[in-house]
């Protein structure tokens, strides 16, 4: 059996309105094991809990109940500083909006996470250049985002997410702002990353994209409605 990179045990999230006693049960006692190297899709209708689950897995939010073990460490109990450190050092994020800094070059954008880790400048450049090469943009590394196509900008965002060698790579509708041909090239890149051993978790509403994944988790009303593997 593959080593588990993440494990959810009875994970729940309740949002309470400060102006009333209304409680929204966004996730309800979710159990989930994620083996290292798996390519997993999270699907479900609006309000099913997809974003909440992604935010909890990505240490962007804390659960109300249950445990979240990341590499056997219970991150549900950590303080904000520790959660920030884990996001910086162990997790990578790719979003529908590329979230690049327009004033910085490709190389400088990819170096940003390493700056916050305190990595030496020369080492930052070396690691960033390696990540840029990994997504096939070495010849564009001194360009600014405005000089790149949408697909190239998303590749830069992927390089930035990869530069800290994350344990988990999250992708939230990563082809949502791209035309179909460009989106396919980005999905091909995710396939390559998976083949290289990366653990990938993708939130998508697109069945064709989900079918590329090894495993599909479907949520409904805050619970896992189905869990299928290809």
Image (cartoon, grey):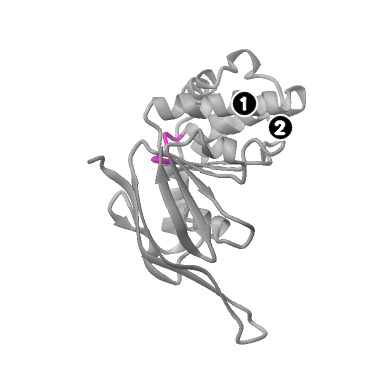
Viewer-closest of 166 and 227: 227
As for residue 166 lying within the magenta part, the answer is yes
Q: Does residue 67 appear left or right of residue 147 in this picture? A: left
**Which residue is disc 1 drawn over?**
184
* Element at label 1: helix
Viewer-closest of 215 and 127: 215
**Which residue is disc 2 drawn over?**
178
Instruction: Judge whether 80 appears above or below 5 on screen.
Output: below
Q: Residue at x 61, y 83 (%)?
A: 22
Within 10 angstroms of label 2, few (less than 14), some, or many (20 or more) residues? some
Q: Which callout, 1 or 2, points to the residue nearer the camera?
A: 1
Within 10 angstroms of label 1, few (less than 14), some, or many (20 or more) residues? some
Q: Does residue 211 appear left or right of residue 144 in this picture? A: left
Q: Main secondary structure of the magenta part?
A: loop
The answer to whether residue 72 is visible is yes
Q: Is tag 1's residue or tag 2's residue first in the polypeptide sequence? A: 2
As for residue 195 lying within the magenta part, the answer is no
Viewer-closest of 92 and 49: 49
Q: Does residue 168 appear left or right of residue 179 in this picture? A: left
Please state, as top left, top right, bottom left or bottom right, where the N terminus lies in the image: top left
Q: Which range is magenta?
A: 164-168
Q: Residue at x 73, y 33 (%)?
A: 103
Q: Residue furthest left?
A: 1
Q: Residue furthest top?
A: 139
Residue 180 location, x and y as percent?
70, 28
Residue 89 location, x and y as percent?
42, 43
* Element at label 2: loop
């Amino acid at each position: 059996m593959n080593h588990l990179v993440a494990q959810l045990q009875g994970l729940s999230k309740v949002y309470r309105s400060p102006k009333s006693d209304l409680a929204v049960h966004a996730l309800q006692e979710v159990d989930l094991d994620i083996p290292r190297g798996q390519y997993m899709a999270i699907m479900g209708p609006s309000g099913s809990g997809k974003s909440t689950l992604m935010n909890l897995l990505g240490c962007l939010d804390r659960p109300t109940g249950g445990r979240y073990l990341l590499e056997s460490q219970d991150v549900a109990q950590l303080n904000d500083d520790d959660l920030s450190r884990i996001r910086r050092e162990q997790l990578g994020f790719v979003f529908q909006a590329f979230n690049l800094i327009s004033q910085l070059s490709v190389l400088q954008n990819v170096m940003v996470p390493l700056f916050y880790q305190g990595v030496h400048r020369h080492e930052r450049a070396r690691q960033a250049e390696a990540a840029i090469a990994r997504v096939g943009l070495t010849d564009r590394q001194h360009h600014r985002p405005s000089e790149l196509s949408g697909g190239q900008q998303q590749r830069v965002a992927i390089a930035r997410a990869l530069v800290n060698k994350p344990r988990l790579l999250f992708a939230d509708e990563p082809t949502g702002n791209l035309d179909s041909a460009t989106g396919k090239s980005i999905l091909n890149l995710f396939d390559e990353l998976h083949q290289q051993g990366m653990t990938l978790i993708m939130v998508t509403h697109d069945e064709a994209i989900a079918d590329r994944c090894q495993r599909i988790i479907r949520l409904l009303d805050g619970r896992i409605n189905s869990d299928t593997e290809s």
